[in-house]
Each structure stands twice: as structure tokens, then as C-alpha cells.
Amino acid sequence: MQIRGKNTFSGQEICAYTFRLLFGIRRCALKSTRQSLNKTGPGPRRHGNTGRKPKHALVFTDVERVVQFICNYAEEYGIPQPAAPSGGDDTEPIYLHSGTTKMNIYKLYKASCQEAGVRFVEKSSSQSIWSACIPHI
């Protein structure tokens, strides 16, 4: 059953144009509100993608793969400091060669993922993962 909408303001029935003008809403917003009311009844409206994850969302295995690659690279090419610096952190820092940049390591990571045929994360995500998970390298 479809409910016909009546636009009222201060107890008086007004046209849809005046209603939209008074409340500052567009025609499509009023239309979608009416459709939602007819479809689900009164209550909060829900977005159509509620509960769905985007296809580009990071998965734990993606993060794990980035961390593992950087740790393996640091183990092979890094120079560990003999003791942890004084402070609250017990992890010894590992220094990479001064000519090595995060961009170079990302390019190596991307090439290895493409060679293996697995999904890789983009540069900004890999740098965020590096800073959050393994800041000691």
C-alpha cells in the first residue's frame, strides 16, 4: 500500500515546492524519503551498502604479507643496533642502508607480489602499515 504524502507546515497543507523551500531539501531527497517510508515504514533510513565491505579494503593477509616482506628485507640487508635505546621500547632498531628508501622497498614488494600473482597494497597503505606495525625498522 502506498501512502500519499501531505506536506504540512504549522497545520496548513502546502505545495511540495514550498515544503522543500521551507525545509531546504532537494526534490530527490524528498522523493527518496517518501520511497523509504512506503517501503519500510517510519524509522531511520539505511544506506544500501550497510554491512558490506569494499573490494579494496585491506585484509589481514595483505597486511601480514607487507610486514613479512619488510622484515625479511631488513633481516637480509639491515644492520641491527646492538641494544635497544633507553626508554620504554624493548625492540632493537634495525637500520637500513642510507641509499635505500621506502619507495625502493615498496617497488621491490610490488614486483615480488606481481611475480607471485598475489594482491598487493598501494604505496600509502604500505607506508601506514610500516609505521604502525614495524616502526623499529
Image (spheres, rainbow, N blue to C red):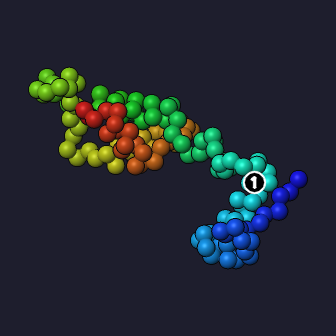
In the rendered image, residue 34, in percent from the top left (x then y), is placed at 75, 60
Q: Amino acid at mark 1?
A: Leu
Residue drawn where x is 71% and y is 71% of the image: 12
Q: Is residue 23 above or below residue 94?
A: below
Residue 49 is left or right of residue 1, and the answer is left
**Total count of labels:** 1
Helix, strand, or loop for circle 1?
helix
In-front residue for pair 83/105:
83
Tell me what residue is drawn at x 86 percent, y 57 percent. Answer: 2
49 vs 133, left or right, is right
- Farthest right residue? 1
The quadrant holding residue 75 is top left
Image position, residue 88 (x, y; %): 17, 25
Depth check, front residue: 55 or 116: 55
Q: Is 22 left, or right, of 1 in this rendering?
A: left
**Residue nearest the observer in this picture, 63 or 107:** 63
Q: Report whether residue 82 is seen.
A: no
Q: Position of residue 46 (x, y in %)?
A: 66, 48
40 above or below 88? below
Which residue sits furthest left? 86
Residue 36 placement: quadrant: bottom right
The residue to which callout 1 is attached is 37
Q: Is residue 27 above or below residue 59?
A: below
Could you tell me which quadrant the C terminus lies in? top left
